Amino acid sequence: MAATGCVDHGVRRHAGAPTACTTVRRVTDADGFSLRSVAAGPPATPILRDVTVDIPAAGITVIVGPSGSGKSTLLRLLNRLDDPLGGEVRWHGEPLDSIAPQALRRQVATVFQRPPLFPGSVLDNFRVADPDVDADRAVHVMAHVGLDPALLNRAASALSGGEAQRMCVARALLTRPRVLLADEPTAALDLDARLAIEALARQLADEGLAVVWVSHDTEQLRRLADHVLAIVGGAVAAFGHLADLDASDDAVVRRLVGAPEPGERS
């Protein structure tokens, strides 16, 4: 069993703020994603610079930061949609660049802000992920994500935004991934659909799927996050539990997580 205790996550804090020591499940190089001195983006103007952080292999980690800070760039590194310019990314102790991208993406699935829909029915879309999927298994995974099985033979293009996003989550689950990356998956949805997708993410995390979720929505972050990774200017500003970031002495971090004012804290 992994040890617990006061853990220095080895991250650089924003604007010289002191490193926080938080009591969390100890994360090692063999557990989840480990990034060490990572730079990424265009070679002439890297978006990420010297990023060192461990992302746990359980629960929901929400990545937050200003627009252009490198949140999506970091997410793309985790399933090799992009490779770093420098430094190293490991997953469960194994260098990520030693894993073939297609094999990795079956284990580390991604859901995007705008669900990519393929021609044909929902079942046809499922067969993009698993050519051998039959109707029984398709209906099972649809029910698992709260998508009406009656939609199985409907054209994917006829789905609502929330239905399309659920279909994409179901499609990702067909490969039996260990991690789900979510790049602002609810940004284009109405509130009811957002809350439904959030509830699905929580359900999947509780079932053992690690979720790494990029969000600009502080209310969503506060509903979802087991851990928060704050990125500012391409560097790690803070990482830890929400309560620890709420108590940060860095005003930028507190603003990013929507921390209550001191008099509002319970």
Image (spheres, rainbow, N blue to C red):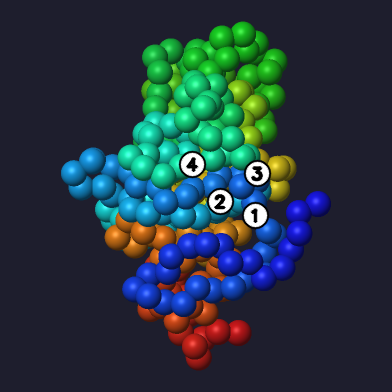
Near mark 1 (Cα within 10 A), the count class, few <14, some 14-19 or many ≥20, is many
Near mark 2 (Cα within 10 A), the count class, few <14, some 14-19 or many ≥20, is many
Residue visible at 41% across and 60% down? 236
Under mark 4, the amino acid is Val
Instruction: Please name which of the two marks, 4 or 2, marks the residue nearer to the observer.
Output: 4
Dot 2: element? strand
Q: CA distance from mark 3 to mark 4?
A: 12 Å
Q: Which residue is mark 4?
A: 89
Residue 20 occupies which quadrant of the picture?
Answer: bottom right
Q: CA distance from mark 1 to mark 3?
A: 8 Å
The first of marks 3 and 4 along the sequence is: 3
Q: Quadrant of the C terminus?
A: bottom right
Depth check, front residue: 199 or 250 = 250
Q: Which residue is mark 1?
A: 27
Residue visible at 53% across and 18% down? 129
The first of marks 1 and 2 along the sequence is: 1
Dot 1: element? loop
Q: Which residue is mark 3?
A: 30
Q: Are marks 2 and 3 in contact (CB under 8 Å)?
A: no
Q: CA distance from mark 4 to mark 1?
A: 15 Å
Q: Which residue is mark 2?
A: 55
Q: Is residue 199 left or right of residue 248?
A: right
